[in-house]
Image: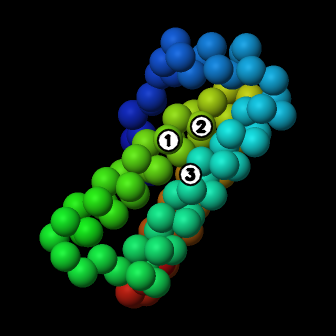
């Protein structure tokens, strides 16, 4: 099994998880994940052509990933972290199985 480094919550994430309402945190996570989805979809369907466009689009994706990671970490405080980790470990195991079976894309 792959050892994962435990990422400790930041004071800001703890504050957000405790002080914001449940619905607010859920909606903010959904919003950030939708923005990430949009940026990724546009990167594939409307690829940038110039170096400047590539740099701008890459930065937009990076920003959306960063924003999404923060919101996901807040969600980890709201839901059963042990079960989340159990699911992540399960998916890693499945991916390792696919790799050992010779799958090219997983």
**Sequence order check, earlier mark of 3 and 1:** 1
Q: Earlier in the sequence, mark 2 or mark 3?
A: 2
**Disc 1 to disc 2, C-alpha distance:** 7 Å
How far apart are the alpha carbons under marks 2 and 3?
Answer: 21 Å
For disc 1, the marked residue is 67
Density class for disc 3 (Cα within 10 Å; few <14, some 14-19, many ≥20) is some
Q: Position of residue 7 (x, y in %)?
A: 45, 28
Q: Which residue is mark 2?
A: 71
- The residue at the point 45 percent across, 50 percent down is 65
Q: Secondary structure at mark 2?
A: helix
- Look at 83% across and 34% down and name the residue there: 23
Residue situated in front as seen by the camera: 9 or 20:
20
Disc 3 is placed on an element classified as: helix
The quadrant where residue 78 appears: top right
User: Can residue 2 be seen at all in this image of the molecule?
Assistant: no
Picture coordinates of residue 15, whole percent (x, y): 63, 14
| Quarter of the rendering containing residue 28 | top right
Q: Do the residues bearing badges 1 and 2 touch, measured as CB atoms within 8 Å?
A: yes
Q: Which residue is mark 3?
A: 89
């Amino acid at each position: 099994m792959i050892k994962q480094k435990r990422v400790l919550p930041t004071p800001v994430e703890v504050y957000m998880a405790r002080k914001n309402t449940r619905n607010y945190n859920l909606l903010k996570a959904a919003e950030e994940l939708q923005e990430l989805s949009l940026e990724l979809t546009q990167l594939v369907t409307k690829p940038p052509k110039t170096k400047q466009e590539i740099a701008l689009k890459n930065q937009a994706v990076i920003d959306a990933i960063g924003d999404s990671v923060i919101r996901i970490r807040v969600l980890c405080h709201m839901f059963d972290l042990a079960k989340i980790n159990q699911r992540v470990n399960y998916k890693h195991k499945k991916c390792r199985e696919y790799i050992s079976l010779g799958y090219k894309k997983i």
